[in-house]
Image (tube, rainbow, N blue to C red):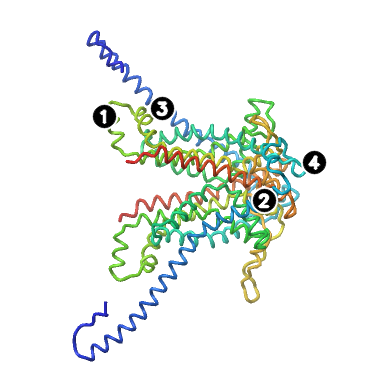
Amino acid sequence: MSAVAPSGSASTTVMAQGLTSARLAQRRSRIWREKLIEFVLFAAASVSVFVTIGIVYVLVSESVQFFRHVPIWDFLTDTQWTPLFDDAHFGIMVLLSGTITSSLVALSVAIPLGTIIAIYLSEFAPFKLREVAKPFLELLGGVPTIVYGYFALLFVTPILQAIYPELPGFNLLSAGLVMGIMIIPYVSSISEDAMRAVPMSLREGSYAMGATRYQTAVKVVVPAAISGIASAYILGISRAVGETMILAVAAGMQPSLTFNPLEPAATITAYIVQVALGDLPHGSVGYQTIFAAGLTLMLLTLVFNILGHALRKRFREVY
Amino acid sequence: MAAVAPPVSHSHDISVIRELIAKHKRWDFIFGLIGLLALMIGVLTFTALFVDMAIKGVPRLDLEFFTSFPSRRASQAGILSAWVGSTLVMMVTAFFAVPLGVAAGVYLEEYAPKNWVTDVIEINITNLAGVPSIVYGLLALGLFVYQFGFGQSILSAGLTLALLILPVVIVATREAIRGIPQAIREGSYALGATQWQTVQHHIIPYSSAGILTGVIIGMARAIGETAPIITIGALTFIAFLPASPVQAAPPFVSFEWLLSPFTVMPIQMFNWTSRPEAAFLVNAAAAGFVLVLMTLAMNGLAIWLRYRLRKKIKW
């Protein structure tokens, strides 16, 4: 810049030199400031890494304490979960059965409906309807889960009881159904985004071959978007497995080893809530159980995420 | 397929094709109906939820409901401590989540070199968005409540929710920044601006509406979160208010409220929902109605903002 002083009289050269050193100092401080700012921004971005490390550290360190008291084999195979009784049993299968059953009910609602809605909005619906339906679905996903829990317990369960009178007041079915409705927006919006990302030329090619809208949607667009749809399903599964309040409110909190959605049962998440509501002393085995339960939950979602990642890699179509 | 069959007569062939086309067109129509039906299930559920809650809860909503503490008697119970607690927790959440999230988003879009460190950060953010909210509660219980000694306080809850919505804010910031054309940056650099000056004077102002949308959506999610706050041990029965942040005597501001025990709207609702007496269920409906209205208003605002943004900005 100004280092290349213009050739002129001696006085202008001296002035230019004075200017240069001042400018250089300014520049140096500026570079330092830029570096400092970049570092601060980097630190903010790396908070997410520390959060992950924090989660793993807390879950693992407390679980290690837990597994000093409870052999890991008992944890995996025992068929009773009575951690707060005198005759304590720690069989995670009991809680896992509740989580799996309620998730299956929820997914059997959310996956078909979410996929149909996504195909419909992406390939069939008129523009105006799409513009209204998308934000509406977003609102559906934004309702607090405690409100859904209230709805499941006091609106859906009585309706189900009218159809099937033996249904207990707390049951996995109504909680699962409402959970399914709650998950629809997660499945549909990501699937729809994936379908809309499929290039128009593929659809045009299909239409040119004489295919109908339905044939194009099901045989061209869906297979082309399958990796995005798979991630939507995986996200739906993670949401179902990690959902807490609907189950804590509407499914009851008694642990029982059952795969029957008509029965009440506790899930991993509902158990954590139940313990947290009580007053367990910090450091007791009961306190540590919730971290072991949380670790199980984390591992479960991790498995699905890895699976999803593998699926995406396997089926990715690049245009 | 049928068209390939050996033609018996020309007219017969055409009628087969016509039938085939009609059959496939019918499928189009049927699927259109199925799609509408699926959408209607969502709409009807939401309407049922909203109307049910309104019918049961709205008669209970009066000024006293907002200005009373929870009580053993359902008819005298109110949500004063709950909405004050929610407001204070949200303030803490926004205070941490917004600067952190925006800074992280700016770094990843404008500064981050393409290397493994950046990859690790990006993968992390994606994964954090999928971590169940109750796990954040466990993190907070182990870390904020016991290791850092913040206790079961507004500060712990606000920090927990801030971490929970951080991915939402980061993703929104990144998307907003990505929409800014490269020419803006080049113009700024051409005038001699440094990278930070470019970010400060161009990138952040131009992406602010998009960031705001993300922040509102994140806050709407945080205000309805129940599980992580129960996990850190928030009490369900609070009949007092935290110390006021503004004091009459010098130094006029007090941060005592940060470490105060608290309750929030969704926990108050949970408490009333899990009681057997019908009168408390009415209270739960009323609290739920307020909660739904709040989240709907926030989400609606975000959707409207985004809609306006899309219409208005033409680079």
| Mark 1 or 3, closer to the camera | 1
| Mark 4 or 1, closer to the camera | 4
Labels 4 and 1 in the same subunit: yes
| Lateral position of residue A318 relative to residue A105, left or right | left
* Callout 4: chain: A
Q: Which residue is mark 4?
A: A87
Label 2 to label 3: alpha-carbon separation:
53 Å
Label 4 to label 1: alpha-carbon separation:
71 Å
Q: Residue furthest bottom?
A: A11
Location of residue A28 in the rendering, given as x and y in whole percent from the top left corner:
37, 77
Q: State the SS at label 2.
A: helix
Q: Residue furthest right?
A: A86
Mark 2 or mark 4: which comes first in sequence? 2
Name the foreground residue: B62 vs B276: B276
Mark 4 or mark 1: which comes first in sequence? 4
Name the foreground residue: A257 vs A209: A257
Q: Which amino acid, by three-letter code, is at mark 3?
A: Phe
Q: Which residue is mark 2?
A: A64
Q: Which mark is residue B221?
A: none
Location of residue B9 in the rendering, given as x and y in whole percent from the top left corner:
23, 8
Mark 2 or mark 1: which comes first in sequence? 2
* Callout 2: chain: A
Determine whether label 3 and label 4 are within 8 Å by CB. Answer: no
| Mark 3 or 4, closer to the camera | 4
| Mark 2 or 1, closer to the camera | 2
Assign the N terminus of chain B to one quadrant of the image: top left
Q: Which residue is mark 1?
A: A208
Q: Which residue is mark 3?
A: B31
